Each structure stands twice: as structure tokens, then as C-alpha cells.
Image (cartoon, grey):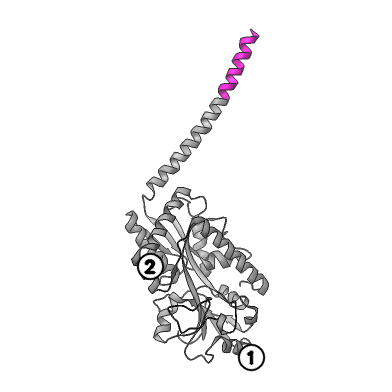
Amino acid sequence: MPAPLAGSCRSDRESFHEQRHRSAADLWWTASAAIDAHAQKYPNRPIRIIAQFQPGTSTDILARVIAQKLTESWGQQVVVDNQPGAGGIVGTELGARAVPDGYTLTMGVSSAFGINPTLYSKLPYDAIRDFAPITNIALTRQTLFASPSFTAKSVKKLVAAAKAKPASINYASLEAARRVTSRWKCSNPRLRSNSITCRIKAALPRTQT
Amino acid sequence: MSGQVPIMFDAIPAVLPHLKSGKLRGLGIGTRTRSPFVPDLPTIAESGYPGFEAVGWIGIVAPAKTPNAVLDKLNAEIVHILKEPDVKQRLDALAFTPVGDTRAEYATFIKSEIAKWGKAVKASGAKAD
């Protein structure tokens, strides 16, 4: 009985397609429901914010302000985890490898996310591919300052002194020495000088005097 | 601070107390306009280097593939927090300029910063140790 067989084949095929559609739809629905449920329940356990610099630094201060307020709003403990080292690379790498469930967040600092990717040919994280930006919290104005005993009293005099006596002035950055050196050297070609070298590579806490 | 290193570059929030106490002297600020926190400190641009600008930024990110709904919830809450009067006051006192932009705006901003510093680093030939 070829006709019924053909008919039955066709209907089998149809039901197979329907089933495939249905199962794809089911899968999609289940997945969205799972994500919705995750978001609705979020957060239902403590959240960790990785700060790439020491307590007392700008990054740490902002992380703590946000952590405290999120704790108050959500009734879940939000803790700051200071992971300093290598100009922010250590903490940022930890953040990149964390489980993407919203329970480990990382401070999106200009040194680690804006400048390191341009300075290092090899970084243990990809500032774009490995992260989902949430929001920019605040801007900080960079200031050039000196110890009161330093002879140059202005930027012009400093540049003149640096050019007159190459490699005579030690220069320190409180956040990431390497990036600031390059920023200092290259942001304005007229400021380029080989005389400014870096000696201190650790961030200095705000509380330290 | 011990006097071993005569010059440094850092964000205002970290150095403000030391500028006020006289332990450090400001030479110039790396923004286009003077800071209301240290109005007497000239900008580096006005000190004879027009166009000089160095602004740091501090945001918050999650690992890639974090669910969108979670990211939206975090964005909404943190943006709201930044508008709260006590937070604004605290950030003001510490010389931060609050932002609180959207996820897309922050993502675009990070890319533009990488492009900006990429050009500068290439032009200077600077390399990390």
C-alpha cells in the first residue's frame, strides 16, 4: 500500500519538523525563563567587587562607596576585594576569569582598561572581549605635583630643567607608573623628554602621609 | 612624600589632602579647565602646552557573558546610587566627577580611550617594562 505509506511518511516528516520547532521553542523559552529567574533572584548571595589598587586609593574609595550602597539597597553583602599588583593587571585578570553570573564585578579603571591594552603587547586579559561594561562611575583629574623642596615651581620650569639635565629627575606615579610616564611623554610632543624616569610603581593610599 | 621623589602625577582625590596640608605643591592640572577644588592651580594646557589633557576614569564592569538582565539591574542601581545626595556630596568632597552613563555609552567610551592612547603610545614609541 504505497499511498498510505507515502502519506504516513509525509506526516512523520511534518511531525518531525513540528517537533524540532517545538523543541527549539521550548529550549528558547526554558533558557529565557532561566535567565529571567536568575535576574529576578539576583542577588541572592554576597557580591564581590575586585579593586585593583590598595585600600585608600581612588579605585578603592569608589568601590567602597558603591559596595556600601548596594548592600543597603539589596540587603546582600557587597564586599570589596583589593587585589593590587602590576598596575592593575593582577586584579583585572582575576575579574576576567570570574564566573559571569553577576557575583564578581571588577572596577573598570582607566589604567587597566584604557591604557594597558595600548602599552602591553601581551596582557592576560582582553579589555573589550573579556568584559561587559556596566557604567562609568566617575572621572578623576590628573594633577602634576612636586615636593615643596623641588626647585621647579611650574610645568614650564620643570620641562626646562628636565631638558637641561637629562635623566636627572626621578618621577613617580601613584597609580601606574608606566602608563603615566608614557602619558606624560606622549600626550604633547613638546613635553617629550628622556629625563623623566619611573621609580615607584605602587599605588599610594590616600590615607598614607 | 619623604622627599625622595620630587615630582608625581596622580588623580586629585588622592593628592588633595596633601596639597591642602602643604606636603605637596601642585605644578599643573591635566584637564582643560581648572579644578574648583584647587582653583589657584593652573592647567598644564595654560602653562604653555595647549591641548594637554589627562583625565582618569573609574567605572565598574562584569565578566563577558554575564546575563543582560543582571547587567541592566546593576546599571540601573549604580546610576541611581550616583544620584543620591549623600553620595554626590561625598564624591564632590573627594574631588571626583560622577558620571553614571549607560552600558552602551561606557562601552563606547572605553573603546575610544583605547584608540586615543593607542595613537599616543605609537607616536611616542613608549613600551612597558
Image mark 1: chain: A
Question: Splitting the image into 4 quarters, where does residue A185 fall?
Answer: bottom right
Three-letter code for the amino acid on which mark 2 is drawn = Lys
Answer whether residue A209 is visible to the viewer in this image: no
Predominant SS of the magenta segment: helix
Query: Quick one: A85 or A38, which is closer to the camera?
Result: A38
What percent of the width, then of the height, locates residue B105? 52, 58
Q: Is residue A6 magenta?
A: yes
What percent of the width, then of the height, locates residue A151? 53, 92
The residue at which mark 2 appears reads as: B88
Q: Secondary structure at mark 2?
A: helix
Mark in front: 2 vs 1: 2
Q: Secondary structure at mark 1?
A: helix
Question: Which stretch did the figure color magenta?
Answer: A1-16
The total of numbered circles placed on residues is 2
Three-letter code for the amino acid on which mark 1 is drawn = Ala
Q: CA distance from mark 2 to mark 1?
A: 45 Å
Answer whether residue B40 is visible to the viewer in this image: yes
Residue at the extreme top of the image, as rendered = A1
What percent of the width, then of the height, locates residue B113? 57, 65
Q: Quadrant of the N terminus of chain A?
A: top right
Please name the residue shown 55% across and 22% down the image.
Answer: A15
Question: Splitting the image into 4 quarters, where does residue B111 fall?
Answer: bottom right
Image mark 2: chain: B
Q: Residues within 10 Å of mark 1 (few under 14, many from 20)?
A: few
Q: Quadrant of the C terminus of chain A?
A: bottom left
The residue at which mark 1 appears reads as: A164
Q: Residues within 10 Å of mark 2 (few under 14, many from 20)?
A: some
Evaluate whether label 2 is on the same chain as label 1.
Answer: no
B87 versus A74 height, above or below: below
